[in-house]
Image: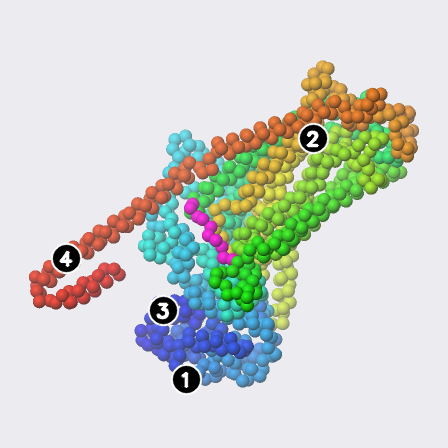
Amino acid sequence: MDGTCADHKLPLAADVNSDAEQRTACGDSKASSLPGKTFNETMRENEKHHATANEDKGIHIINIKAIEDIGYIQPETVLLNSLSGDQNAACKHGLCFRDGQRKVDYILAYTYKKSSGNRTPSKKSHSNNSMHSVRSGKEGHPLPGGTRDLESAEAEPKVDYHEDDKRFRREEFEGNLIETGLELEKDEETKMHGVGFVKIHAPWNVLCREAEFMKLKMPTKKVYHINQKQGLMQKLNSVLQKISEPIQPKVAGHRPQTVKHLSYPFSREKQHLFDMSDKDSFFDSKTRSTIVYEILKRTTCTKAKYSMGITSLLANGVYSAAYPLHDGDYDNEAEPNDRKLLCDEWASYGVFYKYQPIDLVRKYYGEKIALYFAWLGVYTQMLIPASIVGIIVFLYGCATVDENIPSMEMCDQRNNITMCPLCDKTCNYWKMSSACATARASHLFDNPATVFFSVFMALWAATFMEHWKRRQMRLNYRWDLTGFEEEEDHPRAEYEARVLQKSLRKEYRIKETEKEKLTWRDRFPAYFTNFVGIIFMIGLTFAIVFGVIIYRISTAAALAMSSNPSARANVRVTVTATAVIINLVVILILDEVYGCIARWLTQIEVPKTDKTFEERLIFKAFLLKFVNAYTPIFYVAFFKGRFVGRPGDYVYIFHSFRMEECAPGGCLMELCIQLSIIMLGKQLIQNNLFEIGIPKMKKLIRYLKSRRETYLDHEEHVKRKQRYEMDYNLEPFAGLTPEYMEMIIQFGFVTLFVASFPLAPLFALLNNIIEIRLDAKKFITELRRPVAVRAKDIGIWYNILRGVGKLAVIINAFVISFTSDFIPRLVYLYMYSSDGTMHGFVNHTLSYFNVSDFKPGTAPGMEQDLGYSVVMCRFKDYREPPWSENKYDISKDFWAVLAARLAFVIVFQNLVMFMSEFVDWIIPDIPKDISEQIHREKVLMVEVFLKEEQGKLQMLETWKEHEKKREENCNSQSPKVSRSQRGSTASAYSYRVDV
């Protein structure tokens, strides 16, 4: 070994191609140790040989023992990889390479067929002319350029060409990763049967290069003070901080910032501007893993004709997983880390009353996940005033139920109002007073206060959206995302594969001069399938709801014929409760089915980028799940009881079953029951039990499977699992779409039909308090650490929220007008009441029917239960009496009420929309102090660059003056100095100044 490199820390073979300076300094001396060829030349020759013969060849990750055999690293250099006590303590859980210094930034996991027997290949001496006898000492993994010896080749089992192809593609991909500068280390001696791991480390020069490419904003040395509020606002803020002290998480950096580092996109040419006092923490683990993932996505496998990077290799099973590591254990008291801190201060149910440590979440998981939890926190906070107002409205209904004249008239048995039968032949006449409990319960949700609450919730939704935009802008400023624009993402693996297929089909016809891409003609079959599939799924939902309607009608008829008096008395309650439970079960099942169908429909479209794929998937899944969740509620709110006909002329389904009627108190009470059961059922079963149970079940299955497979390997029981092995057993991160989706559906329950269920915000608040900690616990304990993604907003979900808010105004207007009795009561009070009160309202809404006008075979067969003969029965509708010339025709009262209902819808919708837009306009999207700070940052950055330019000019002037004086001195002292000598001296001095 050459003496110039004796004390140099030479990396492993995985590092040789990654460090340009080390390669320049020591490349010749190392190459001289290999007879006739450099190491890279041997690797390239080996790859060429592998392309022609399908044999098991060398890989780019070299075992230390084998490298020592071939003389590439001298024995004293190998000692760098032995762990000292401190290094072992620092990296005993697999967070570093074997040298105990280089951090593991990313993990690639793969499966391989592991033989049950252990063969120890014999050592071969190193030949001066070739490296064919070099072995790694580990079965199945020879060195680059090496082959198995004859003894091992005879002992090998039959070649699995599929596994061999995967191994070759891994070798090529890992070699390309090395060429990008990454450092790799392989580990197959794990406790996991047949699973190998490739540890990836990004050195400093790679981090700097990629940070510049990705335009990552990093903190500079320039620090400035954030303007603080003065006067009364400052005192108010200090008081609020003291009050909120107990509910603040105990994490560093959660306090309001008073100083801030000026941030600027990283540049290698301007490294002197950045705060590099601690290079180890300049790029945190989240940023390092993001940089490595970007390299993995764009690194290709061209020889295998797979040019799609890690996504394609994962999809084809070449690698089984790719993930960054968690910082450590979350339940180890002796080793504090960010994961444990998040578990204690964020993912614990005992801190449900505290604010979330959003900055720490962003530091650990990235901006996209942190924005979701920040949005969920803002949404939960905004539910507090909505819940308080909803409780007040409900209590108002409870307080005024005994003063409600219509319900008192319905409960008064002295009125002796006989109602027409609810079904043909088997159902008897009944007294209105028997529906007293339903009428009183309806008043709890159908009172004048619900109209106010509907207007309030519409304004609440607009205020919530504006509040979130301002909160989002503050986070963007704090996280240095102002001015961040998402660049076009890398094409997806499936898209590249389709483009490759298309280009191969065209190769024999025409020579392509430009890059191929998919057009609408290529996607038309997928678009048509999407359209037909979505229409079919929506039709299926309608068919299921129609089936539940048939069940309700047939069950009501069957119970009416029952000989049990209690069954006949509770027909409505029994039918409503069982039908809602059936609807809930169907909704839960179809939610999972529709999620899978939406993903399949999006996959066959072959979107180009991950962002496009996610947006299209969200749109389809939301459309299908929205229809699935709200169709039963829409039926009860707007269709039930509207098309029943009248006694003597009912509307029948299949000529057998009469359409359902609303209760005398209206359908609002039934709508409330339907909404509450579906909402609470979805939150309890789907959002909580499924989220807890399914990940734990999958984790248990993987644990039992791995334990059974490793049972045969006796030696593996002695070893402790490394960090990457434990993370491999966790559930892969599947994206935020399911988390957002359940909250958007809940937002619809809170806003769309809030007029019928004022307690919806309260139940949503209680659910979300648990949901935040449940999601946090799932991220910390059950999921692999996801790759951090930069994002400045919540994307398409904001537009969906705005759409749901606009739709809520329209739906609540129709619920108040057509589902509740609010408008009929107003019409009666101001047009028909003789004394200006609601006395006589119930009688006004009921029409008369002569029982002699029943069709043959439809009249009740029993009348003895009432104790008197019935001549006239009543039914709820606005129709002419039987003694009128146009008997049973729609009366003028109906048209007056209908006109009032439509007028209310128009006035309510436009008024509330105008108020919402006014709230949107009056509240600025960007807080004033944030806009001032952003402007100040720009001014300060300009000042920094101006000072830098002035410094350069001063340095240049100083150098010119110094050079001029030097030339004068040289001319005066040595007039015979040649011009060429002066020029060479000046050039050498100029070079030193530049350096």
Q: Which residue is mark 4?
A: 964
- For marks 3 and 2 on the same chain, the one whose residue lies earlier in the sequence: 3
Q: Is residue 351 visible?
A: no
Under mark 4, the amino acid is Lys
Residue hosting label 1: 128
Mark 2 lies on residue: 818
Return the disc, 1 or 2, that comes first in the chain's sequence: 1
Answer whether residue 953 is visible to the viewer in this image. Answer: yes
Packing grade of label 3 (10 A; few <14, some 14-19, many >=20) is some
**Quarter-of-image position of residue 45:** bottom left
- Give the label, 4 or 3, closer to the camera: 4
Q: Label 3 sits on what residue type?
A: Gln
Circle 4 packing at 10 Å, graded few (<14), some (14-19), many (20+), is few
Residue at the image point whose x is 39% and y is 31% from the top: 231
Q: What is the C-alpha distance between the residues marked 4 and 3? A: 39 Å
Q: Residues within 10 Å of mark 1 (few under 14, many from 20)?
A: few
Q: Is residue 365 left or right of residue 819?
A: left
The magenta-colored residue range is 482-492
**Residue drawn at point x = 60 percent, y = 75 percent:** 160
The label shown at residue 526 is none
User: Which quarter of the image is occupied by the N terminus?
Assistant: bottom left
Of the pair 503 and 392, the residue shown nearer to us: 503
Asked which secondary structure carries label 2, the reply is: helix
Helix, strand or loop status at disc 1:
loop
Which residue is found at the position 18% from the left and 66% from the top? 984
Q: Which residue is mark 3?
A: 22
